[in-house]
Image: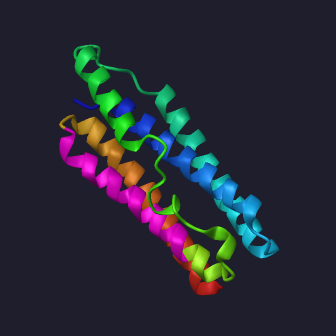
Amino acid sequence: MFSLKDIIDIAVQIEKNGERVYRNAAQKIKNPSLRSLLQGLADEEAQHAKWFEALIETVTGTGDFQEQEKMGRALLKNAVGDQSFTLEGADFSSMEKIEDLLKLAIEFEKDTVLFYGVIQPLIQDQQTLEQLHAVIQEEENHVRHLKKMLSES
């Protein structure tokens, strides 16, 4: 059984992983425009993580299934770990075009949405499911924002 708190914990981890990869990449990039873009993406991921962390503070556990929730939390954290989906193997230092970077960031955000979609069928609590839908919507908005940036570049 997965609780809303478990899902939010994983969302925080995903966002922090994305932030870490974007910041590490920004340190390796020579092109100032790309470096700035990476730093901006990292800042957005950090803001998402803070948003999710604040959301966690509003969630109260049911207390009825503490052992199952603990096991579910451990499984989810092991599944995500330090993975940052599409970004992990990316060679940002070889990218010369902002378009390439935006395309990669879009794929990362889409992977995040897919992860939340995989979890969705496991959710039985209606309130948790509604909150997960809100999380997915936030990530889809991020994809739309990045696509808009891509079309304007």
Highlighted range, magenta: 103-123
How far from the left and from the top, in percent, is residue 91? 60, 68
Left or right? Give the position of 116 relative to 33. left
What residue sits 18% from the left and 37% below the top?
Answer: 124
How far from the left and from the top, in percent, is residue 32? 81, 72
Quadrant (top left/top right/bottom left/bottom right) for the N terminus: top left
Left or right? Give the position of 146 relative to 72. right
What residue sits 79% from the left and 75% below the top?
Answer: 31
Secondary structure mostly seen in magenta is helix
Q: How many labels were placed on the picture?
A: 0
Quadrant (top left/top right/bottom left/bottom right) for the C terminus: bottom right
Residue 6 among magenta residues:
no
Q: Choose between 74 and 65: the one closer to the eye.
A: 74
What residue sits 44% from the left and 40% below the top?
Answer: 81
Residue 106 among magenta residues:
yes
Identify whether 75 is placed above or below 134.
Answer: above
What colour scheme governs how the chains and residues are painted in the rendered image of this protein? rainbow
How far from the left and from the top, in percent, is residue 118? 26, 51
Q: Choose between 141 and 32: the one closer to the eye.
A: 32
How far from the left and from the top, in percent, is residue 53? 54, 34
Left or right? Give the position of 135 relative to 105. left
| Quarter holding residue 35 | bottom right
What residue sits 61% from the left and 51% below the top?
Answer: 19
Identify whether 89 is placed above or below 18.
Answer: below
| Quarter holding residue 10 | top left
Left or right? Give the position of 15 relative to 81. right
